[in-house]
Image (tube, rainbow, N blue to C red):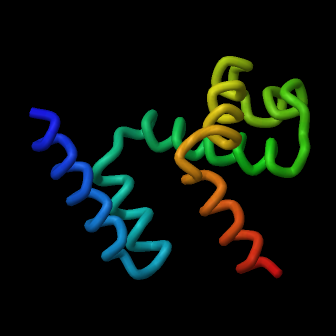
Amino acid sequence: MEKRRHAASEELCRAILSLQTPEECEAFLEDICTIRELQDMAQRFAVAAMLDAGKNYQDISKETGASTATISRVSRCLNYGSLGYRTVLDRRKEEQA
């Protein structure tokens, strides 16, 4: 069962990597996610960017509506996770420079 789940996850990653434009990515995410799931992911990414910019939990919560539990979870992932947030945030900074 675990092997099958991993294969499905890998296939999803390959599908995402095949997207070539932000518009294609947005269309795919709108099709594969519920509105709530998409909102939650966007919120968590915004929280990660704000934490990376040095904002405090209270300001992040006010600005995003995220709970302190969500902010804490994102902070743990940002600092001790699989480097997913870090990779994306660093690449976005490079693009903007």
Quadrant in which the N terminus is drawn: top left
Tell me: residue 67, above or below residue 44: above
For residue 78, what is the image quadrant? top right
**How many numbered dots are placed on residues in this image?**
0
Residue at position x 17%, y 50% in the image = 8
Quadrant in which the C terminus is drawn: bottom right
Tell me: residue 42, above or below residue 10: above
Residue 33 placement (x, y as % from top left): 34, 44
Residue 56 placement (x, y as % from top left): 90, 32
Tell me: residue 75, above or below residue 87: above
Please tell me which residue lies in front, 53 or 77.
Answer: 77
Horizontal placement of 14 versus 93: left or right? left
Residue at position x 88%, y 24% in the image = 58
For residue 37, what is the image quadrant? top left
Residue 91 placement (x, y as % from top left): 66, 71
Horizontal placement of 44 versus 58: left or right? left
For residue 55, what is the image quadrant? top right
Horizontal placement of 70 versus 82: left or right? right
Residue 60 placement (x, y as % from top left): 82, 34
Please tell me which residue lies in front, 43 or 57.
Answer: 57
Residue at position x 25%, y 56% in the image = 10
Horizontal placement of 16 versus 89: left or right? left
Residue at position x 71%, y 34% in the image = 75
Please tell me which residue lies in front, 93 or 81.
Answer: 81
